[in-house]
Image (spheres, rainbow, N blue to C red):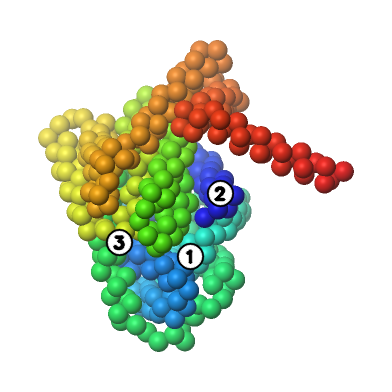
Amino acid sequence: MGRKRMTISLTANIVSYGTSALVALVLTPFLVTRVGKEAYSFYPLANNFILYIGILGIALNSMAARFVTVAVVRGDTREANAYFSSIFKVNLALALALVPVSTLFVANLQHILTVPPNALNEVRILFGLVLLAALIRIGASTLGIATFASDRLDLRAATDIALSGVRVVAYLALFSILPPSIIYVGVVAAAVEVASLAMNWALTRKLLPRITYFSAPFSLGAVRAVVTPGMWNAVRQVGAIMLSSLALLMCNVFLGPRATGDFAIALTVPTFVAGLVAAVGAVFVPATTYRFALGVGPELVHEVQRAQKISGIISSVVIGIYVAVALDFFRLWVPSEDEELLRALSILCVVHLVFTGATWPVSNLNISMNRVRVPALAMIVAGAVSVGLAFATLRFTDWGLVGLAASSLVPNLFLVLAFVPLYPCKELSLPRATFYPGIGVALLSFSLVFGCALALKSVVAPTSWLGLAAVSLSAGCIGLLLSAMVAFGPKVIGEAARSIGARASGSGRLGT
């Protein structure tokens, strides 16, 4: 991936995810006010069930992009078609096979979750629509390969921005015309998946015109080649769910819908920061896969180290600002809730992402290497430890939500500080310290931004959204500049600034 294309893709992904985060930040207090905190708690719960059912599709799809991309890079259209068409057909069959299972789940929902009797019908319809959206996503997931294989993640981000617009318009229309209901969340989820299917279909036809859907012969060997390592990615996703998403379900079962509402509100920003880390890290996966396809060498290591610095700085800047202003944020965002509790829960769930941002490109290297079994086992062990700690906390202590939020912190820190940076070094025979400088840059970046935000708060009290924005943007700009100078050196930053200025000057002359 060229530097210009990577910059465009990175910017587009950040804008895309920022748009989605903005929608969620507006939607959360709106839903809490309109439908109540207890009913709202089933919104993130339903979204988590998309992750649960998506595990089945991960075995098929998590490695499909890698195999199709390698075939495309090598110019083997026949092999690329064999992978794409075969996985596409299996995805459709899987989605259809899950329809009766999803129906039984929705029919027996009251035996699985703690649902207030007066809200049972609405919650059932919500889960039915959300599971329908999940099945559409599984059936159409192969279409998302096109932007990856053609190195056009900027187009994927543009699609995501358009889908955020669809989501906003749909919510405004439904809540303006009809009485408030949590059901509309499911309606919008299904509508967005249908729109996503149409957009990805068009992108596949444009970017991979030689790819076929049905006409290519079905290849069991291609499916087996993708599923064998993909099964370990599914195992890894189970571990990831145990580390994060399962806590919300346990909260519903042990503490009830009201506490689940508090936990869901506190998880809103950490969830989107985690998504931002993944979105930024995803920009570098095609380049890493491309480098690996050409052969392991210094260029591959340099690509991952550069991605570490960029991903780590971006995530650390966001987290540093958030941790500094979290209390002020909750006071403004949900003024009727316990802001001290929400801040404590939220920080416990977000702080490890400082290191995750710097190690995400390293963990993606395992996919490029097709070495996914050991990372999957490490993730499932960490997830099991997290669930065990959460259960013990809920069952034998009175720590409540704080203990639940803290239960995943230690396993997460072990993964991002020990296992993730060391395992690829072993597989590629690299020095053990190869990927630790990127982690150090992320930690320094977090400290700089956090310090800037605290200093600015002492001058400008963020008692309004305007004050909060002023502190956050100022701390972000200062921290980003200082972090970039530390990571890449003043000379590199100066050259980049002059290059941008030269382009702007050239554009101005052309326009006169």
Front residue of 84/286: it is: 286
Count the marks: 3
Q: Which numbered disc, 2 or 1, marks the residue that appears first in the sequence?
A: 2
Callout 2: few (<14), some (14-19), or many (20+) C-alpha neighbours within 10 Å? Answer: few
Front residue of 209/3: it is: 3
Can residue 256 be seen? no
Q: Which numbered disc, 2 or 3, marks the residue that appears first in the sequence?
A: 2
Q: 498 above or below 191?
A: above
Mark 3 lies on residue: 370
Q: CA distance from mark 2 to mark 1?
A: 17 Å
Residue 16 at x, y percent in the picture:
55, 49
Q: CA distance from mark 1 to mark 3?
A: 16 Å
Q: 444 above or below 50?
A: above
Residue 119 at x, y percent in the picture:
37, 52
Q: Residue at x 42, y 54 (%)?
A: 288
Q: 422 above or below 101?
A: above
Which mark is on residue 149?
1
Which quadrant: the C terminus? Answer: top right
Q: Residue at x 17, y 39 (%)?
A: 389
Residue 367 at x, y percent in the picture:
33, 58
Q: Is residue 247 left or right of residue 197?
A: left
Amino acid found under the numbered disc labelled 1? Ala
